[in-house]
């Protein structure tokens, strides 16, 4: 019996498949930061947990590889 492997998706297909979900997660993150800032003020936005979340946002946006591993390490240090 011959195994037929399905071709891998292209980068365009992968982006198309994940775009709406990723955009939604980022929007929820931005909305959460807005709610926290409204309720806790600017001083609260300097808390250690918020600093770590902001660092994660920068980590996600940078162009270095291994974002997933670096993200997990960031939060495993808590």
Image: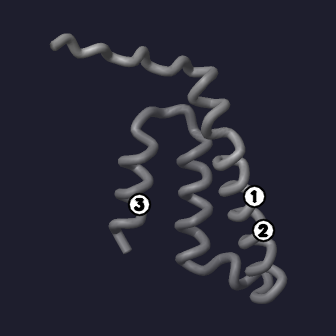
Q: Mark 3 or 2, which is nearer the eye? A: 2
Contact flag, marks 3 and 2 (Cβ < 8 Å): no
Rendered position, 54 above or below 37? above
**Residue at coordinates 72% horizontally, 48% vertically from top-left?**
23
Q: Marks 3 and 2, how far apart in space?
A: 22 Å
Residue marked by disc 1? 27
Rendered position, 34 above or below 70? below
State which tag comes first along the sequence, 1 or 3: 1
**Residue at coordinates 54% horizontally, 17% vertically from top-left?**
10
Q: Nearer the viewer, residue 36 or 24?
A: 24
Residue marked by disc 3? 74
**Residue at coordinates 69% horizontally, 63% vertically from top-left?**
29
Residue marked by disc 2? 31
Tell me the element at label 2.
Answer: helix
Q: Mark 1 or 3, which is nearer the eye? A: 1
Q: Nearer the viewer, residue 51 or 70?
A: 70
State which tag comes first along the sequence, 3 or 2: 2
Q: Marks 1 and 2, how far apart in space?
A: 6 Å
Contact flag, marks 1 and 3 (Cβ < 8 Å): no
Q: Which residue extends farthest left?
A: 1
Question: Quick one: quadrant of the C terminus?
Answer: bottom left
């Amino acid at each position: 019996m011959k195994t037929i492997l399905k071709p891998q998706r292209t980068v365009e297909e992968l982006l198309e498949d994940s775009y709406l979900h990723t955009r939604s997660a980022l929007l929820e993150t931005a909305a959460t930061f807005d709610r926290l800032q409204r309720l806790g003020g600017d001083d609260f936005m300097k808390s250690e947990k918020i600093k770590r979340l902001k660092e994660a946002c920068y980590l996600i946006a940078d162009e270095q590889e291994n974002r997933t591993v670096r993200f997990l390490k960031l939060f495993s240090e808590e």
